[in-house]
Every structure is written in structure tokens, then in C-alpha cells.
Amino acid sequence: MTPTLRELTPEQALKHLELLFTRHPDGLLQGDHPALAPGPGDELAETRPYVVGDDVRRMDWNATARTTVPHVRLTLADRELTTWIVLDASASMDFGTARMEKRDLAVGAAAAVAFLTERSGNRLGAIFSGSGPGGHPQGRRGTGPHGIRRIPPRTGRQHLLTILRAALDRPRVAPGVPADTLADALGVLRALPDRGGLVAVVSDFLETGWERPLRTVARRHQVLAIETVDPRELELPAVGLLTVMDPETGRRREVPTHARKFRDRYAEAALEQRALIKRTIHRAGAAHLRLRTDRDWVRDVVKYVEDQRRRAGGGAA
């Protein structure tokens, strides 16, 4: 199992993440952008048969008509890639009841994206919503201490580590309606003049209002939505009367967890919510990866990369 980050100093955590993704024994996590989010590029490479989950916008209708079998176009990724990491730093990301909090899981996911896309000439930038003191207000309401922070894209390992250090050091956010939301962070990215690249959005997607901005960003960029989940968000333990709080609004409520029917209704509603998030991400034209605080997230990232490579090669098992 992968160690947690909360017990390490920021320096130790950075070193740990660097070792995870630069010396992984199976060699899967070594600077491979197409393994994250295959999508359109500048140069046509080849076609292959369509498999479930492929982006229908890449359908090759000539090959489909010629072979009577649905085919999709494969393209070569840009030689110089700009990757943006959009990190949700809202109060709900400070929650965790398993091996780590979602904020730690989000940093790990950001590290995976950063090291996977690190190649000579590639640039990495970051946008943090609710980044706290020291942030650079860029959003519509980013004027308070929890403004959106934007780190311009640059090349180099030191810049990569600077972004991860900023993610590790971001302060906790008090519960309540956030001054700046994930939608605001995506709006900052949408307004930038950069050409299309890769955008990794790391969030629990429990806010509302991000759906349309995500769809707009996905029109110009390849987007990978990394969803962070804690097991207590999916089902409740039977511990009697439990006081719970919505970190996004600050509202408190007492819930009767001793009642089996109540717990079943909660679990059913949670599954529906997660299914809706997944459908919304796919409808926006983004790839989707779900990571959990009670699982070995590195192993799940590796599995995702393996699946993407099989799909790109047309040899899905």
C-alpha cells in the first residue's frame, strides 16, 4: 500500500512523490501524455477499430464506410505540450476518514499528471481554487484571502516541484459557501490565450456550476477529470445519532444512522450522485478517473494508464 502524505514534512512528501513516479518498477509512469487522455492532436497517425469509451468526435467515417466497421482516428500528440492542473481546494477536499484526506489524494493525483507529462520542452501550470493567503486573485470574486491562485506554465523539474509544494502548502478553508469555486477556476483557464493542451481537473465535484465551464474548456483542450472520493461519502456507519456538516455550505444536520432504511437511502442517493458526476464529465467530452482515499491510488493510476495504452493500441483485453 502507498504511504500517506499527512505524516510527512512537505520536503519528505515531495521526495516521496518524485520517487513514486520517476522510479516506478513497472516503468508505466514515465512521461507519457497520450496514456493520460488520448485525444486530438495536430498530426494524423493512423486509425483503429472503435471500442466502447472512445471519443465519437474522432470517428473516421471514410475508414468506417470502407470496412463497414466503426473506426476512430489516432493522432500524434503535440511535440511541446502545455499541461494545466486545476486543483479544487474547497473545504470539502479537507475531508477524509480512511488512509488520507481528499486534499492529500489530490496532491498525489497532481503529481501523477505532472510526472507523466514531464518531457523536454513541455510546460506545466496550475490553478488552485480557494488557495488561501498568498494566492493571486483571478476569478470574478477572487478578492479575499481565499482567491484563486494561478501559477503560469513553465518547463523544468524545479518548476514542477514548486507547483507540488504549493499544493501541499495550501491552507485549509473554513466551511461555508466558497468565495471562489471550481467553476471560477475553470473560467480563469478558459480566458487564457494558450493553445490547446492537456487539462487535469482534480476535484470531488461536489459543488455545482462546474458543468458548463468544463464543457467549454474541453472544446479546446484534452481534459482529464480526476474525481476524489471518501468511503463515508458513499455509505454511513451505524453509530446512532450523528451530527454531520456540509463543508460547502456550513449547514449542520443530525442524521439517524442507527436506522437501516436511512443508511440504505443514503447509499442509494450517493451512488446516484456519483453516477451523475461521471455522466456529466463524459458528456462534457472529458476523460474520467476516480480515486478513493481507502485504496492504493498509485495502483489505480497505473491501471488507468495501462487501460488507456491498450485502448490506444487497439488491444484492449
Image (cartoon, helix red, strand yellow):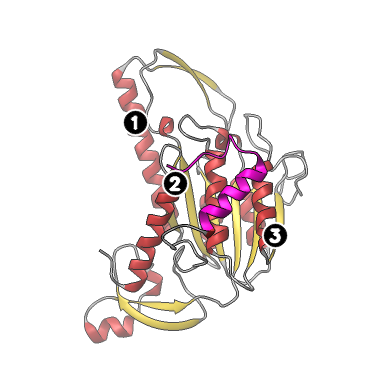
Find out whether the residues at labels 3 and 2 contact each other: C-beta distance under 8 Å.
Answer: no
Q: Which is in the foreground here, disc 3 or disc 2?
A: 3
Q: What amino acid type is highlighted by mark number 2?
A: Trp
Question: Which quarter of the rendered picture does the N terminus lie within?
Answer: top left
* Residue nearest the observer in this picture, 276 or 9: 9
Q: Could you tell me residue 144's position as x and y percent?
A: 77, 39
Disc on the earlier residue, 1 or 2? 1
Disc on the earlier residue, 1 or 3? 3
| Residue annotated with mark 3 | 158
Identify the residue at image location x=44%, y=46%. Answer: 297
Q: In this rendering, does residue 281 appear at all?
A: yes
Question: Which quarter of the rendered picture does the C terminus lie within?
Answer: bottom left
**Mark 3 neighbour class, 10 Å CA radius: few under 14, some 14 to 19, many 20 or more:** few
User: Is residue 265 rendered magenta in the image?
Assistant: no
Distance from the alpha carbon under mark 1 to that under mark 3: 43 Å
Could you say whether the residue bearing mark 3 is in a helix, strand or loop?
helix
Furthest toward the left, the residue is 68
